[in-house]
Image: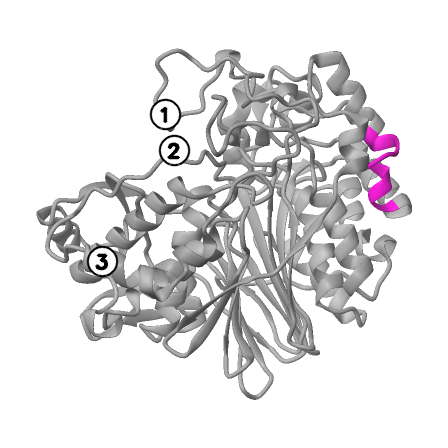
Amino acid sequence: MSKSNWRDRAGTTFTCEKQPAHGSNGMVVSNHPLASAAGMEMLAAGGNAVDAAVATQFALTVVEPMMVGLVGGTTCHIRLADGSHRILDGMSAVPKSGRPDMYKPVPGAAPEVYDVEGQENLVGPKSVATPGSLRTWCQALERFGTMSLADVMQPAIRHAARGFAVTPYLSDCIQSAAPDLARDKPAAALLLADGAPLKPGTRLVQGDYAEALTLVSQQGEKALHGGALGDRLVECMEKTGGFVARADLTDYKVTERAPIRGQYRGWEVLGPPPPAASGVHITQMLNILEGYDIASLGFGTVDTLHLLAEVLKIAFADRAEASGDPDFVKVPVERIVAKAYADARRSALDLARATAWTGGLAAAEGADTTHLTVADGKGNVVCTTQTINSLFGARFIVPGTGMIPNNYMNNFDPRPGNALSIAPGKRVTTSMSPVMATKDGKVRYALGLPGGRKIFPSALQALINLIDHGMTLQEAVEAPRIWTEGPVLEVEHGIPDSVRKGLEARGHKLTIMPTVAGGMNAIQFHDDGSMTGAACWRADGVAAALGGGLARAGVRFELPR
């Protein structure tokens, strides 16, 4: 397959590395081909988008164990065929025994750094927060799906039991986390061969995890939230000083929230509300950008990137001042998403020079996430992001289960008295951005990506690429990105040297990055009922279509028979 080249009237060009998929009866886009194929099995068997999404999620816990697992957190955006939107908040929470002073901050650490003595909030059992991902997936399937949990979990169980080929991406991730993984016997036995990270092409079999998934397929969420898997997790916590107790697991509740709805040039953009920061700040940034002719400024020009950088800094300054779990912190959503507030912020912008925008405390957040976007031919769409926070989460395996827990306690401020300080039951603040864009009441785009604090700025840029720059879906997800929360501006290699120099001339301090955030995936919905799916070059993503094709950078995949 040939690569496509994109050029706008400002003269900016870039080349797409992958090919989109096209279909009419369904689409699954995820960050691994086996996960996308798992979702396609459900659609091909007559399931709906929720069935396919849950199958894809469970498969991702097998093939992307560094990113997602049963003991993690998730934000799920579902649009049903009747046009209603549901946001399911399954983010991890502080255990009931949590206290504002449960960790000892490293003396002299910067306010934006959550370093504690012994890295107890980052690695090991004391870093684990109460999980919500499994309960969210099971409840989404029960409420909105059509197939049994046992059926949708079969691909995941199969790949865990039979094994799969380690990708270069997974191998590199194991290499990055190897020093910590080596200190845990189960993790070292699974992921390190004679002390060395598994090489690409090695077959990874996860027998214990296959048994854990089988138990979940039989017992549902109760296997973890009150059953044998939960007992194993709690036993591990009790032996090693962790904080998650049985009552944390049994009492955890999935919260349904109304989406944030923003208006931009005749489009409606819908995203998750707090504790997710994305819906609020994407809306805020679009409100500010609406006052400029982005299309005329051109994609990737000095003018456009300077404007984007300044708007990102405004959003992060406001996020730092007003962010958190709405059950614990008053988040002024109405004020921040108001058009009048955007007018005031816009009036303070300097289009000629970089400005320092200040806020309160920054939010820590792991960048190692995964995302999937799924649609069926009946009008149901699922856009969901999930993670165990950092790469390989807490970097140990619960003995006998194959489960790698999250390290979400690292996302809370270890100092008492702040908005993001620790409190029992408080949920993690997240940048997860499962967003959808509608026009004239019809969904047109659904997209998301991994990347920690870089997620919602990247989602914003994809929306601008589609709405203002008129890119195709593949171009929009693959286009070069920038990111900043001030003072350093990160730019990808795809930004030309002449543009970098122009940005530096305006006062930006640049850092050149191989990637900004991770592998975005998205679906576009056309007037004739067909769909286009796209996954970008930044991960192992694959778009799979029902009534179309399955493509990834010139490679064809066949569904399991």
Q: Is residue 333 left or right of residue 237?
A: left
Q: Earlier in the sequence, mark 2 or mark 3?
A: 3
Q: Which residue is mark 2?
A: 361
Span shown in magenta: 220-230
What kind of element bears circle 3?
Answer: helix
Rendered image: mark on residue 232: none
For image coordinates 76% across by 70% down, the residue present is 44
Residue type indicated by callout 3:
Leu
Circle nearer the viewer, 1 or 3? 1
Asked if the residues shown at circle 2 and circle 3 are in contact, with their CB atoms under 8 angstroms apart, the answer is no
**Residue density around tag 1, few if under 14, some if 14–19, many if 20 or more, within 10 Å:** few
Relative to 176, does residue 457 appear above or below in the rendering? Answer: below
Rendered image: mark on residue 111: 1
Residue 43 lies, in percent from the top left, at 74, 69
Q: CA distance from mark 1 to mark 3?
A: 27 Å
What kind of element bears circle 1?
Answer: loop
Circle nearer the viewer, 2 or 3? 2
**Residue density around tag 3, few if under 14, some if 14–19, many if 20 or more, within 10 Å:** many
Rendered image: mark on residue 307: 3
Residue 324 shows in the view: yes
